[in-house]
Image (cartoon, helix red, strand yellow):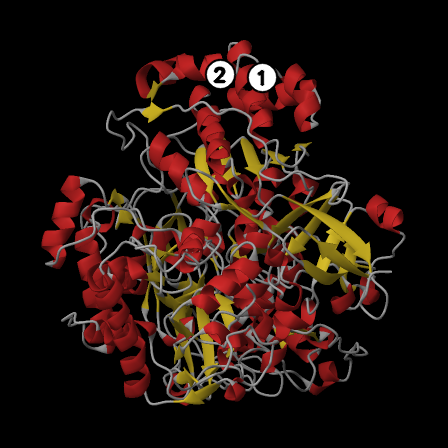
Amino acid sequence: MSSLQDTGGVAFELDGQPVTAHPGETILKAAQRHGVEIPHLCYSDGLRPDGNCRACVVEIAGERTLAPSCCRAPTEGMKVQAASPRARKSQQMVVEMLLSDMPDVGYQWNDGAECAPELIADGAYSSSATGPLDSKSAPAVGQHGELSRWASRLGVTVRPALQALRREQPAPDLSHPAMAVNLDACIQCNRCVRACREEQVNDVIGYALRGADSKIVFDLDDPMAESTCVACGECVQACPTGALSPKTHIGSQKVDRKVDSVCPFCGVGCLITYNVRDEKIISVEGRDGPANHGRLCVKGRFGFDYAHHPDRLTVPLIRKPGVPKEVRPYGADWRDTFREATWDEALGLAAGTLRSLRDTHGPKALAGFGSAKGSNEEAYLFQKLVRTGFGSNNVDHCTRLCHASSVAALLEGVGSGAVSNPVHDVEHAELIFVIGSNPTANHPVAATWMKNAAQRGAKIVLADPRITDIGRHAWRTLQFKADTDVAMLNALIHTVIDEGLVDDAFIRDRANNFEALKANVMGCSPEAMAPVCGIPAETLREVARAFAKSKASIILWGMGVSQHVHGTDNARCLIALCAVTGQIGKPGSGLHPLRGQNNVQGASDAGLIPMMFPNYQRVDNAGAHAWFEQFWGTPLDETPGYTVVEIMHKALAPDSDPHKVRGMYIMGENPAMSDPDLNHARHALASLSHLVVQDIFMTETAWLADVVLPAGAWPEKTGTASNTDRMVQMGRRALNPPGDARPDLWIIQQIAARMGLGWNYEGEESGVAAVYDEMRQAMHASIEGITWKRLVRDSSVTYPCLTADDPGQPIVFTEKFPTPTGRLQLVPASVIPAAEKPDADYPLVLITGRQLEHWHTGSMTRRSTVLDAIEPMATASLHGDELVRLGVAPGALVGIRSRRGMVQVRVRRDDGTPRGTVFMPFAYVEAAANLLTNAALDPFGKIPEFKYCAVAVEVMQATGVPG
């Protein structure tokens, strides 16, 4: 064991060999790092050491009792024996006693796997009482998980006398759709308690009663399904014996292969591992990625089976002649509307008609919507197809509907549309300002870092019209009146200036236009703005002082900030608040718009927006335009294209309009559910001469198509995605697409070939790598140093990363801003009202958003068995006082009506939703919230005002008519 010698740290002796421990490292961790395994059960990486199982005890010279190595730090010169006869005997005794109480049938994920015979033959797992345990070759996890593994390695078998003393086994709890609770296999290690209460901070699992009656409980000993469990599954991942396990492993825990990838849902970008059996994903594990460190949420852990849903499109489809274009009900049979076709026929019709429309009516007659649910390579190739094949810049994607205004303000103010600091940087913050975001529902893993920071003493300020779950952990809650963001934020900026809290050095050295900002907020004192925004003046001043005085304050915001006609102004105010306090360009500070879809950041970076080439180079910038013309070898349109909502207007333009949009190619987007004023959007899509839709399901948009192309789901492709933290991350193919479905990248290239483009990105992975390498050249200022080989090796690299040995820059703007002057540009913002206000006919305000279990338009999550079982029904949330005013109880059927449409929905009581307000998720086609929303646009970001419109609520009779 001479290799154990190390330098630096605390020097001590382990099993007779000199070793060192890093500062703060335990004996167990130091031993592991040096290749010496010590048995342990209650300890797990990432969890606080508890020392309660005593399987990890070691003998320390001069000490009377054995010490738990998981929570004992070595001291200089300490002599530790992990494999002495005394230590080994104790370790074996603990494991034997725990094993003796196990049920005859195991529940662990790899239940029934036995030790590899060749390892036993080699003597790696001798049954002798002493000797080192080699960490390099371990047996498969056995019937009772880690307990069986350590029993095998320690040579432990259970004596019949101990088996006869087994406890009375508790009954199983199979009430939850995703997880099985079998406490007969529980060893009360408390890993699930720590995972739930300390990692995820959900406070559901507890340890109750005493002595022989002690047990793990959910809330007040409720069945798991009736508890407040949010199904993150952290307890399942933490459990060493399978007492808590995924239901998909009941009966057989066999796994054919494990494939590392990245979560396909929100922008946090959790790294995951797919467990595959019989060519189906049966479970998902969290991987130790930089964004999640093993943590997942209910969607990431249990939302995987959408890929196997019987609704998957498996063959190209062509609309039957004469069938009207209309959105059909969920689950309708497409055979009444479409016929099956070969790929040659479908591609020929799809591309041939698009080409004919281009040649007949000009390049402005075509438009494309790409996807933020796909890969960077797909986004890059799709926008390249539109620009070089269609001949215009009419290309957009869902960023237009989520953070376009944030990006507009950030590009204007700091010169970059991405975040300044990663979410995890909240661990260095003293104050965390969360505004217009419900992170526990929309970015649950990111929310865990915020909750962890609050546990350590950081102050969370929640600013939102709704008090959401993160409010439980907030130091102060600013429940401002909807639509008054600018008034409230200007009051905070005013306070900073008025009370002499400005970071004068930052303003002098790094910011422009301060005097204009100061003049603009002069009349926005907290006392003047309090009646406008509904927050007491003293509370506004208190929060402003705390933000300015903390050593590090960070702002995280969501679509509650961006989805307004004044969304860009909202973001301008956030930039100004950071600037005047100097809270940017250092750890724990800065600006972070939380991205909603898994690759909305990457798709935007790759140029899937109408006014920007890749890496946010404007299409009307002569230098950028000339560079891309040379790079792609073709003339390019020099005028910005139309955005999502503008394209819908152009689809309904008169035939005399030379820029009328007549044909569209939509890949992986669902504007017939995601656009505002859906009746208008659906009418526009149905009015197109030719619509090609490429997707994995018959979405609401696909029902309006002329040609439907079956694509591959995220687990069926290899490619990269960029998360909200600017991390480029590798997704690997775990499955093949079903039937005749094909990967998106292959389909885009087939369309391109029939549009006359001579591309050549061949090979499954080599083709993806070739596209990525080209994208790297087009985005050299951000990802030049991130090679494909490096991504394959590391899975995740943060940009900007400019050289092969550059580790990436998680924190940017430390010295200068990527603006023309190198300085931050302050832009004053005045109070602008919403485009539509409540009145006597429509007295309430509608706010839309996401919910924990469902995502975007629901096309994927509502086809996940677990997710749809937990939240199967569309609801609208109202304050209890509003329900009393309406004379209805929770669960009652109501109609919600705006000037654009009406939906029927069940009501849910939520006293965090303010009086006079209704909150609705937009994932349910049977109650599509966007039938109600207003298409009014922010003039800068061109984003619709999803977060504010006037509605009325009507009580419905059982027949579905107003009562």
User: Residue 364, position in %: x, y?
Assistant: 28, 57
Residue 129 visible from this viewpoint: no
Q: Residue, x 69% and y 70% (percent of image)?
A: 872
Disc 1 residue type (three-letter) = Cys
Q: Is residue 268 left or right of residue 861?
A: left
Q: Is residue 190 left or right of residue 960?
A: left
User: Residue 309, position in %: x, y?
Assistant: 53, 81
Q: Quadrant of the N terminus?
A: bottom left
Q: Is residue 685 left or right of residue 881?
A: left
| Residue count near mark 2 (Cα–Cα under 10 Å), binned few <14, some 14–19, many ≥20 | some
Q: Nearer the viewer, residue 317 or 375?
A: 317
Q: Residue, x 42% and y 41% (percent of image)?
A: 941
Q: Are marks 1 and 2 in contact (CB under 8 Å)?
A: yes
User: Residue 332, position in %: x, y?
Assistant: 59, 82
The Cα–Cα distance between marks 1 and 2, rounded to whole angstroms, is: 8 Å
Picture quadrant of residue 648 = bottom left
Residue 377 visible from this viewpoint: yes
- The label on residue 520 is 2
Q: Quadrant of the C terminus?
A: bottom right
Q: Is residue 530 left or right of residue 856?
A: right
Rendered position, 754 above or below 723: below
Picture quadrant of residue 750 = bottom left
Disc 2 residue type (three-letter) = Asn
Picture quadrant of residue 844 = top right
Q: Nearer the viewer, residue 580 or 457?
A: 580
- Secondary structure category for the residue under label 1: loop
| Residue count near mark 1 (Cα–Cα under 10 Å), binned few <14, some 14–19, many ≥20 | many
User: Residue 775, position in %: x, y?
Assistant: 22, 57
- Secondary structure category for the residue under label 2: helix
Q: Residue, x 69% and y 26% (percent of image)?
A: 535
Rendered position, 285 above or below 539: below
In the picture of the structure, the residue carrying the numbered disc 1 is 524
